[in-house]
Image: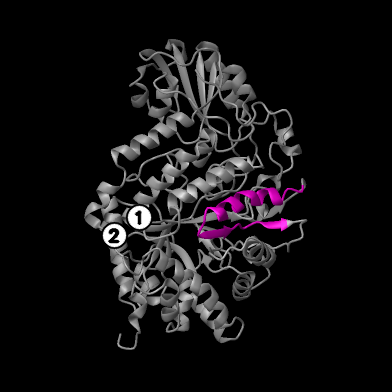
Amino acid sequence: MNDVDTRYRDASLSVEDRVEILLGQMTLEEKAGLFFHTMITVGEDGELSGPDPVFGLPSNEEYVAGRLMNHFNVLGGLPSAELAAKWHNRLQELAASTRLGVPVTFSTDPRHSFSDNPLAALNTQAFSEWPEMLGFAALRDEALVERFGDIARREYTAVGLRVALHPQIDLATEPRWARQLPTFGEDADLTSRLGAAYIRGFQGAELGPESVAAMAKHFPGGGPQQDGEDPHFAYGREQVYPGGQFELHLKPFEAAFAAGVSQIMPYYGMPVGTEHEEVGFGFNKSVITGLLRERFGFDGVVCTDWGLISDGEIMGQPFPARAWGVEHLSPRERMVKVLDSGADQFGGEAVPELLVDIVRAGEVSEERLDVSARRLLREKFVLGLFDRPYVDEETAGAAVGTAEFRAEGEAAQRASVTLLSNDGVLPFETGLKLYVEGVEPGIAAEYGRVVATPEEADVAVIRLQAPYEQRETMFENFFHAGSLDFPADVIEHVAAVAASVPTVVDVFLDRPAILGPIVGAAAAVTGNYGTNPAALFDVLTGRAEPKGMLPFDLPSSMKAVEASRPDVPFDTADPLFSFGHGLSY
C-alpha cells in the first residue's frame, strides 16, 4: 500500500478534502464498483457467504474483492443480532483488505413490520415489531413516527445497516395498487408530515456518524398506476394522470427535501401523457435532472430501482429488466441512458465491468463518473464508515429488540387498529366461548375458551386478508393486485357464521377492500395494518383502545374504483367509509 496516499483516513480533514484525495487515486475499476448497489446474502454462523444457488448471487468475496463493489442490500431474514454483526464485520474486514480499503455501505428494505412480504419488506425477529406504515398513517402521530425512526435507527446501526431503502412516500391514490401498505396512505399533507418525521427519526437533525441514511421513494410518486397494476411487471409499466395531478404527487418529496433526505429512488413506471419522455423514471432526464436536480436542487444520491439494466430470474421464472420505454436498448445503452438522466447508482445490478467498458469505449466520460462518485464517497465519509467501519458484536444483541422497544411497537400495533363498525359487541369480556378463524387457537385461548363451531360460541372472530387476484407466478402474488371484491364464497361463509353467533371480522387492509357485504353481515368490523393476534385481542376485549382512523377511503364498489382517476385522491364515488373514519369505545 506504499503507493496509496492515506490522508483520506484523516478525520481532521474536511469531508470534501477526503473525498478528493481518495477519488484522485481511484482506478476506473475502483470507481465503477461504487455504482452498483445490489443484493447480498448473510453467511451461516456470521461467516462470509459463498455463492447463493437460491438467488443466483456470487460469493461475498467475489463481490468485494473481485468486482470491487461496496454497496449492498442485505437480502433475506437476518440471524441473531450478534451473528448479523459478526457477518457485517467479516465483510468490512474483507473490504479493508482491498487496495484502498473503501468500506461497505449496507442497506435494507423495511424490517420492523409485523406482516412480512419476503421481497418488499423483511422480517427480522431480533428487531422490535411495529405496524406497517399505513398503521402509522392511521394514527396521524408525527412524534410516534419520529420515535419509531429513532428506534429503528438504533437497531439498524447496531448490526451495521446504514441505509434505509425507505420511506415510501408515494400517494395511494389508486385503490387497486399493490404497493400501498408501506405508504402513508392517500392524503398528500399527511404523507408529507409523516414522511418528514420518519426521515428525521432515521437521520437525525442532519446526516452524521450515528445516522441511517434514508432513501425516499419512488420519485416523482409511484401511486398513479394505470388500472392499479404495478410496474415491476410489463403490464403495469404506465403511470397516468387523467386528473392532471402530477404536481400533487411531488408534495411529499418536497417535505422530504426539507427534512434533509439523503437519497432518492425513482420508480420503475413511465409517465404517459405528460411533458416528460415516456420512459421509466430511472431513465428519465427531464425528471431526474430537470425536476429533482434543477427544480428541487437535490444533490444527494439517486439510486435507481432494482433491475433496470439486466434480465434476470426470480423463483425459477424469467424476469426481464424493467426497462420500460427502452426495452429495445441493449444493457450498455440502458446504462448510458441512466447516467445521462442524472442518476448515480444502478440498483440491483452487479456488472461494473460493463461500466468500465463503456467508459473505455468513450461512450461515457470518466469525468461524468466522478460527479456521482463524489456523492457516493461523500455519504460514506459523512456516515463515519471510514472512521468506524465495525460494529460491536458483543453488545449488538442487547441493543436491538429491547423490552422497551418491543412494548412500544406492540402499543402502536394495538392503537392502529381501526374500528369500522360495531353494533355493541365490542369490546367483549374475556372468558367467553370463542370460535376463531385465521387466529392461532392457542393465542385466542388466552382470552376465552376456544370452541369448535360457531353454534357453541358466544362470539366469533374471523381474520381476513383484503382480497386480491391470483396471478401466474409466485413472485407476482407477493404484489396483491386486481379486484377489491371478496369472493362470493368468503361473503357467504362470513354471513353463515354471523347468522349463528355475533361475529367480529378483522381485515388486513393492505389495500382498501370493498367491505359492504362484510359490514352488512358482521356485528363488528375492524381493519388492521400489521397487528399480531394478541395485540388485536387486547383491542377486542377492551384491554386497549382502537385509535386508528382510515388512511384512505374504502370504496363502495368496483364500479366506483374503475371510474376513479388513478392520480386523484378521494376520487371514488360514495365511499363506504371515508378517510379519517374510525370509531372508539
According to the picture, the residue beneath numbered tag 2 turns out to be 391
Give the residue type at disc 1.
Thr
What residue is at 43 percent from the left and 51 percent from the top? 202
What residue is at 65 percent from the left and 52 percent from the top? 250
Q: Residues within 10 Å of mark 1 (few under 14, many from 20)?
A: many
Q: Is residue 178 magenta?
A: no
Figure quadrant of the N terminus? bottom left
Q: Could you say where residue 342 lies in the image, as x and y percent from the top left? A: 61, 69
Q: Could you say where residue 278 lies in the image, as x and y percent from the top left? A: 73, 62
Q: Quadrant of residue 525?
A: top right
Q: Residue furthest bottom?
A: 3
Q: Residues within 10 Å of mark 2 (few under 14, many from 20)?
A: some
Q: For this view, does 235 lie left or right of residue 74?
A: right
What residue is at 58 percent from the left and 50 percent from the top? 255
Please determine whether, in this image, residue 525 is positioned above or below residue 82: above
Stretch of the chain drawn in magenta: 244-271
Could you say whether the residue bearing mark 2 is in a helix, strand or loop?
loop
What residue is at 63 percent from the left and 22 percent from the top? 517
- Label ID, residue 411: none
Q: Quadrant of residue 11?
A: bottom left
Q: Residue furthest left?
A: 394
Q: Could you say where residue 114 lies in the image, as x and y percent from the top left? A: 42, 39
Whether residues under marks 2 and 1 lie with C-beta atoms below 8 angstroms apart, the answer is: yes
Q: Could you say where residue 188 lies in the image, as x and y percent from the top left? A: 63, 43
Residue 470 visible to the viewer? no
Q: Nearer the viewer, residue 168 or 561?
A: 168
What is the spatial separation of the Cα atoms under label 2 and label 1, in whole angstroms?
8 Å
Give the residue type at disc 2.
Val
Q: Nearer the viewer, residue 71 or 377?
A: 377
According to the picture, the residue beneath numbered tag 1 turns out to be 157
Please determine whether, in this image, residue 244 is positioned above or below residue 85: above
